[in-house]
């Protein structure tokens, strides 16, 4: 929807996957699923609680991402999201800007400039650090009303999350979105994916409830609606879906909260893999911005779905996090690389560096 001129210096970026041949199918759609705070222990806690398996295990290629930010060994979700969305490491707390405060082109801007459709889905407010990194430029992740003000001009085609209160502040961003042609709804069930208008769904004042509190199949349905809407664009799309509260469970050192959010997120992962099966040219990436809680699992029982969990911190840790890939171009995600390498591989897959 939005035209903008993007100048990027891609010299020197080498993506470690087999060179494209004429016969290799092109990637048209990228679905990026981020489990905030989801390290290997969080995943295995989910596998254990789910009695031995998750949809995530269908992944075809696995890599590892080094998550350090420009300012800290242990990143926050602002710098972590910005690295994945812009390909540049920045300071903790920063959204879509470099360490000098200069705005960086993000995945939504680059995709819109290439004529792709774009979407964001989260179980937090849609202005929270992770989704914000894909659409906004802001020195402080905490200014969610200002981040909301950057939605109407972004060209995004569908966004689903909490944060109604940030859009309904004195600037009345909801009215601006309506003026810009958006359909605004408050429930996922009110989204018609065949509606030609861009859609905003603000399903909670701030965050959605937890899975344990009865969020139901919100994330699965939101992901399905977003994929169905975005699939109408023959040029393709970029969609980011976040399991936001895996991180919050880690901060709370609450293993039941954590496993319920992991299993909920995994439902969306399964739906994205299914979409890739039925839509050739779709690449699905599942990763995290960092690990949260320093979780270890000294004991468990797979047939009962029970486990013993030990957390070593109530904040994030600096360990590598896995990157799972499925579908067209998935092979490019094997290996060990910086978190910025996820951006490099998505840009390469969608050929976003070729001037439109
Ligand atoms: Mg997050
Ligand atoms: Zn966190």
Image (cartoon, helix red, strand yellow):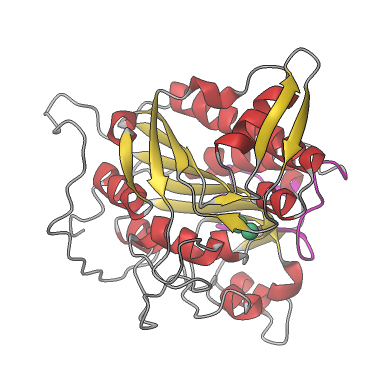
The one nearer the camera, 177 or 254, is 254
User: From where the camera sits, is residue 286 visible?
Assistant: yes
Residue 151 picture location, percent across and down: 54, 70
265 w.r.t. 13: above or below = above
User: From where the camera sits, is residue 232 visible?
Assistant: no
Quadrant position of residue 171: bottom right
205 falls in the magenta region? yes
The one nearer the camera, 298 or 256, is 298
Q: Which residues are magenta?
A: 190-213
Quarter holding the N terminus is: bottom left
Which residue: 62% across, 23% down?
A: 54
194 to the left or right of 348: right
16 to the left or right of 335: left
The one nearer the camera, 61 or 125, is 61
Ligand 1 position by quadrant: bottom right
Which residue: 42% across, 59% down?
A: 68
Quadrant position of residue 234: top left
Residue 321 picture location, percent across and down: 48, 43
Residue located farthest toward the right when viewing the structure as drawn: 213
51 falls in the magenta region? no
Which residue: 37% across, 26% down?
A: 280
298 to the left or right of 134: right
């Amino acid at each position: 929807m939005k035209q903008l001129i993007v100048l990027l210096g891609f010299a020197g970026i080498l993506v470690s996957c087999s060179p494209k041949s004429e016969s290799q199918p092109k990637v048209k759609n990228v679905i990026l699923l981020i489990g905030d705070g989801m390290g290997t222990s969080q995943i295995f806690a989910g596998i254990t609680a789910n009695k031995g398996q998750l949809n995530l295990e269908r992944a075809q290629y696995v890599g590892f991402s080094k998550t350090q930010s420009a300012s800290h060994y242990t990143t926050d979700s602002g710098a972590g999201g910005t690295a994945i969305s812009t390909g540049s490491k920045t300071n903790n707390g920063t959204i879509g800007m470099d360490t000098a405060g200069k705005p960086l082109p993000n995945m939504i801007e680059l995709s819109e400039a290439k004529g792709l459709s774009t979407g964001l889905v989260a179980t937090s407010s849609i202005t929270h650090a992770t989704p914000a990194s894909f659409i906004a430029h802001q020195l402080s992740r905490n200014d969610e009303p200002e981040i909301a003000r950057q939605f109407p001009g972004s060209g995004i085609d569908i966004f689903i999350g909490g944060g109604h209160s940030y859009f309904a502040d004195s600037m009345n961003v909801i009215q601006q979105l309506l003026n810009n042609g958006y359909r605004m709804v408050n429930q996922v069930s009110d989204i018609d994916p065949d509606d030609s208008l861009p859609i905003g769904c603000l399903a909670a004042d701030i965050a959605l409830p937890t899975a344990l509190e009865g969020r139901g199949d919100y994330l699965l349905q939101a992901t399905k609606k977003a994929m169905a809407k975005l699939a109408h664009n023959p040029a393709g799309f970029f969609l980011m879906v976040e399991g936001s509260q895996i991180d919050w469970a880690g901060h709370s050192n609450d293993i039941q909260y954590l496993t319920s959010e992991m299993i909920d997120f995994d439902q969306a992962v399964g739906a994205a893999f299914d979409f890739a099966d039925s839509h050739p040219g779709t690449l699905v990436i599942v990763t995290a911005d960092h690990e949260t809680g320093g979780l270890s699992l000294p004991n468990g029982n797979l047939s009962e779905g029970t486990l013993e969990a030990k957390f070593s911190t109530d904040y994030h840790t600096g360990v590598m996090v896995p990157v799972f890939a499925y579908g067209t171009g998935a092979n490019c995600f094997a290996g060990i690389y910086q978190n910025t390498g996820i951006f490099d591989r998505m840009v390469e897959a969608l050929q976003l560096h070729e001037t439109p």
